[in-house]
Image (spheres, rainbow, N blue to C red):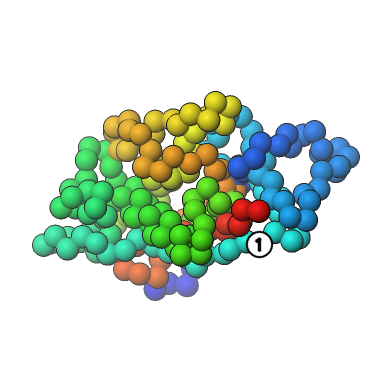
Amino acid sequence: MKNRTKLVAAVVVTAAVAIPGTAFAATHAFRPEPTQAHSFVTGDTPSIADGVAIGKNVAWYKSSGLGPAARNTAPGASAEERYIPTDVFPGGELPDGVTLTEAQGINALARIGENLNKAGLSYDDVVSMRVFLQNPKGEEKMDFAGWNRAYRQFFANTNLSTGKAIDVSLGSATVAPMVVNGARPSRFALEVENLPVDGWLVEVEVDAVYPR
């Protein structure tokens, strides 16, 4: 594995509770209460938050980085295809427009959900996220669009004004989200030259805040 890491995309930050960012910018009047976590969002349907402010006495959880689990045992599956979640895509067959990064992203985020559940948390408690993406074999760049489709299956898929779920993309199709969740974590995404497991295209780690 090479040591060099390529910084290709730094992707913005997120939020869960809408608090106007500009209202406090000039005076710096806003400070989170010691037991509060405030996410800053812009608009009703953003994919991520502008940022999150966490009080000094907030209980929070930091996950390890998780990639997808090797669930596809179909004969002839490549190293990357082994990480297609067969509970979502039976037989490892991907529907029209679904990419390997998208499938692996769904797999990795499902594992994140299991990880959170063990800690007594859920997806809607996530306040920040770091994403590492490797370009698929034969491709020059990471598949950021595929990752984003996977992400919105689990996050940022409600209208914050109405609370209603928003249909999301799964490859070329439009579907109901796998997990309805209004949380918009702060987030960055980087393309890296190599992830630590052969065949991984996605690795994710999150921070989550325990409800008061």
Image-based side of 137 in relation to 3, left or right:
left
Taking the image as drawn, is residue 180 in sight? yes
Secondary structure under tag 1 reads: loop
Image spot of residue 92 (x, y percent): 19, 53
**Is residue 198 shown above or below 107?**
below
| Vertical position of residue 202 compared to residue 124: above or below | below
Q: Residue furthest left?
A: 75
Q: Which residue is mark 1?
A: 59
Depicted 165 relative to depicted 204: above or below: above
Quadrant for the N terminus, please: bottom left
Q: Amino acid at mark 1?
A: Ala
Residue density around tag 1, few if under 14, some if 14–19, many if 20 or more, within 10 Å: some
Residue 8 visible: no
Q: Position of residue 166 (x, y in %)?
A: 44, 30
Residue at 38%, 45% in the rendered image: 150
Residue 46 placement (x, y as % from top left): 55, 34
